[in-house]
Image (spheres, rainbow, N blue to C red):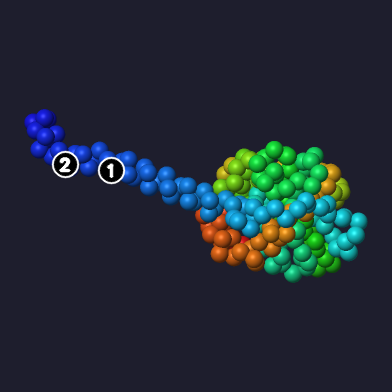
Amino acid sequence: MGSGMRVGSGMRAGNVLKLPQIKLHRLFLVVSILTVLLSCGEQSTANAEPGPTRAFDFDNTEYSVAIFAGGCFWCMEGPFEKIDGVKEVISGYTGGEKKNPAYKEVASGSTRHIESVVVLYDASKISYEKLLKIFWRNINPTQDNGQFYDIGEQYRTVIFYRNEEEKKAAEASKAELEKSGPFDKPIVTRILPFSGQFWIAEECHQDYYKKNPVHYNRYRVGSGRDSFIEKHWGSSH
């Protein structure tokens, strides 16, 4: 009976044998396409070569400054810029030693910079503590190897403090989140002193959510960021 089954359904058996190969091939194609569509920065405009980056001038701003790293910096601009009292959010690179790092260098992980944002805000309208709450609600603070789809130290979550007041506020907010937050895993977001320079990212990355809304929203959904925020906080960006 065993040999009869093989002979009697030879053509179908051949098709069955080929089917997994076809499915695997299609799966590979889908994964390849998604890799291109979902990656933070994998866009023709994002891969442009607009010239060297420049350092942010902390001494010549009339507003208070906060610095956060929440994974792909595209996804950290909108949540802050929509808040009354926030004047501007600037994407850039923090941490590494190389001067004027380019996006491709940072994305490769070779410069040890971290994708970050500078938040310029009016302290008379919004507090640093409020900014911390917005930050926590837009990241996965339990992921240590990056953020969502983007893996690597360049996508780690960090609160960079510039004085003792910010350090104490950051530590207090982290402790509160650990005690009463909606997570069943340890909070691994780092709280580090800011040092060196904040290198302003290339212009094509600034306000990316406004310039390229279709790709931006596709990335947010595909990366899993929106579903994570929805699950733990009940709403997304």
Left or right of residue 1, residue 29 in this image: right
Quick check: 224 above or below 105? below
Q: Residue at x 42, y 48 (%)?
A: 29
Left or right of residue 172, residue 24 in this image: left
Q: Nearer the viewer, residue 34 or 193?
A: 34
Residue designated by label 2: 11
Q: Residue at x 56, y 61 (%)?
A: 215
Q: Residue at x 74, y 69 (%)?
A: 84
Residue 200 at what x, y percent from top left? Answer: 77, 54
How many neighbours does mark 1 have within 10 angstroms: few (below 14), some (14-19), or many (20 or more)?
Answer: few
> Looking at the figure, which quarter contains the C terminus?
bottom right
Residue designated by label 1: 19
Q: Nearer the viewer, residue 33 or 144?
A: 33
How many neighbours does mark 2 have within 10 angstroms: few (below 14), some (14-19), or many (20 or more)?
Answer: few
Mark 1 belongs to which amino acid? Leu
Q: Is residue 64 visible?
A: yes
Residue 77 at what x, y percent from top left? Answer: 69, 60
Q: Secondary structure at mark 1?
A: helix
Q: CA distance from mark 1 to mark 2?
A: 12 Å
Left or right of residue 38, residue 94 in this image: right
